[in-house]
Amino acid sequence: MSRPLSLVLLHLAALGALAPGPAGADEGMWTYDAFPSEQVGQKYGFVPSAEWLENARLASVRLANGCSGSFVSAEGLVLTNHHCVHECVEEISTPERDLVKDGFLARTRADERRCPALEVNQLVRISDVTARLRAATKGLSGQAFAKAERAENARIEQACQTSAALRCEVVTLYRGAIYQLYQYRRYQDVRLVFAPEFRIAFFGGDPDNFMFPRYDLDAAFVRVYDGGEPLQARNFFRWSPAGARPGELTFVSGNPGATDRDLTVAQLEDQRDAVLPDKLARYAELRGLLTGYQLLGPEQARTSNAELFYTENSFKVYRGMYGALEDRRFFRSLVEREEALKAGIAKDPALAKDSLPAFDQVARAVERGRALRDGYDFLEKGYHSGLFKKARALLRGAAERARPNEERLEEFRESALPETTLELFSEAPIHAQLEKLLLRHDLEKIRERLGPDHPAVKTLLGRDSPEEVAARAVDGTKLRDAAARRALWEGGAAAIAASKDPLLALARTADPAARAAREAWEDEVKAPLKQAHDRIAAARFALLGRSRYPDATFTLRLSYGAVQGWTEGGKEVPPFTTFGGAFERHTGRDPFALPPSWLARKGQLDPSTPFNLVTSNDITGGNSGSPMLNRDAQIVGLVFDGNIHSLGGDYGFDPALNRTVAVDSRAILEALSRIYGASDLVAELRRSAGKS
């Protein structure tokens, strides 16, 4: 980084410093029901109306795999990123036809291919349930608090979800100051329409990831079907063939996954000193393992491409987050921000009495978490083998569904079962060789971290090696067959108990220790943290109300900004790149090798066509696939990344450096028209823009 991340500048000693950032900063991932329209109007001269916001909310969608998207036609067409459908493209590929490498275009509706495990959610209703949660947990602490909160959440969600076509989630905002019920329309028939070649979707590869200038067509289209027919979408974004101009106002509507801008200093120190270094070490090792596996041959490379992509991306994200917290001046700004909050609370004796001790409670929970983290991270969360996770879902599903809904693990509540079963019954191919590699690695890491004498390790491995246990379980299982998994699920506890499947047996062996680790974490770490943050959040909310935005929670948010570059090392970084720049960057060697389709049609392209752009919108992970809009709610870009400085945005926002990276709307149309010959798709987009 060219200079330290000063970021939010919320660290002045005065209470006014607790306001959302410096005057005029394009900061904040705002909920739709508290969007600062007047604030936007003061800076940009445009005030989004209630009707504008309502249409934008309903035209935006969430992909259950952790991405965002948007309806872009009345025929259920959804725009998102290639990397958001990468797994789908890999799953519908075959050894004979590698669609990740070659790309995919459905020439007709009949050619559109169903994504095995992709779900699209449309937010249709928001309601406040704070009073119910407060009443359910009043006077409770520790395990009793956690149990009461889980039970009330389950009751609220179950009452809301009156059909499998709905998805209901209780959402915590402002770290516990507000609880809201989000009701989504759930769509599980999602079909791939277009995905370009991986070489152009991720041109520049890992070296260019989170960098700018960029030259990526990280775009894809899927279509939502309802009742076997394309969804008739009432709300959708129209396409802007003209794109955006430098300095123009832009909005990003998406589902940012998580930010930690409201963590206490004790938690930030734990992130810096323990959590992030450990994650970096683990992802670096996994990246090396997968890179070596890819060298075994083209089929191994094809079937592990998505796994390696996500691993490399995660490693770079965590490295950026760690770098931000390692910066002493930036970390000091976070300390001063907390000191300013405490000073503001101290001015009100009632607030101080209830809230200031909560900071110490957080510190105690963090310390307890250090002791419990290895067991939780490795026994409960530490499996990369998707096949093992399916076996555990079958095992736990049988036990959990026999319990009252409010007592179940959250992934087996009635409100969550449609997503759980979509993944469980997916027809996507499972590759035994890769699964053995990942499961062996998982077991090796459990033994390495917990030690060979740990009771759970002895139970898992006995006298065998991780390699032997993994090979026996994967080679002997029938769970690679979706029909076999469905039969066991429908057979319930009796079928699970009677099964001799070796992978299911391994999951059964592993489960008691994993459940115990999860229960200890939730009762002794998560619940005290949650309760303490509720008290801190109540004080912060009493001082500021909804004049500031809440941390991201993978729920729909709207940010505003402008097309704007930045200064790097004393030089201005322009906000646009062009097609011509992509050909100049082409070396013919990966990751800077354009696909043959682009090279063959170079002469037909306008080299001055804008390709990628940057804006000052505030985003984070989960915004991938978000539409970038102008004031007329037209799509001018497709968000796919942030610049390297944005990686510190988990903890704060620097308006001078943090930038959103998007594919220009003009680039998508130009590529579809002149490279891929996607005339029907282009015509559909032009119809949505009101053009023939």
Image (cartoon, rainbow, N blue to C red):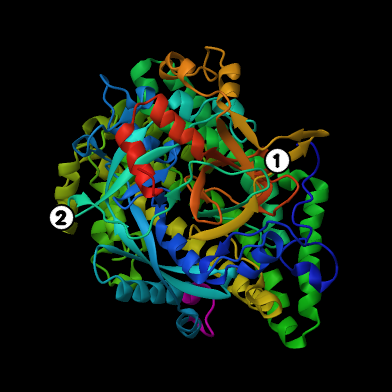
Q: Residue at x 47, y 45 (%)?
A: 625
- Position of 654 with respect to 110 (left or right) is right
Q: Which residues are magenta?
A: 137-145
Residue extending farthest front: 692
For the residues labelled 1 and 2, the Cα–Cα distance comes to 55 Å
Q: Amino acid at mark 1?
A: Gly
* 335, 646: nearer the viewer: 646
Q: In this rendering, which labeled residue sits more in front, label 1 or label 2?
A: 1
In the rendered image, the vertical position of residue 689 relative to residue 663, given as above or below: below
Residue 653 pos. (x, y %): 70, 53
In the rendered image, the vertical position of residue 81 relative to residue 75, given as above or below: above
Mark 1, residue position: 565
For mark 1, give the secondary structure. loop
Q: Residue at x 58, y 22 (%)?
A: 580
Q: Amino acid at mark 2?
A: Glu
Q: Residue at x 33, y 43 (%)?
A: 684
Residue extending farthest right: 13
> Sequence-wise, which precedes: disc 1 or disc 2?
2
In the rendered image, the vertical position of residue 444 relative to residue 270, given as above or below: above
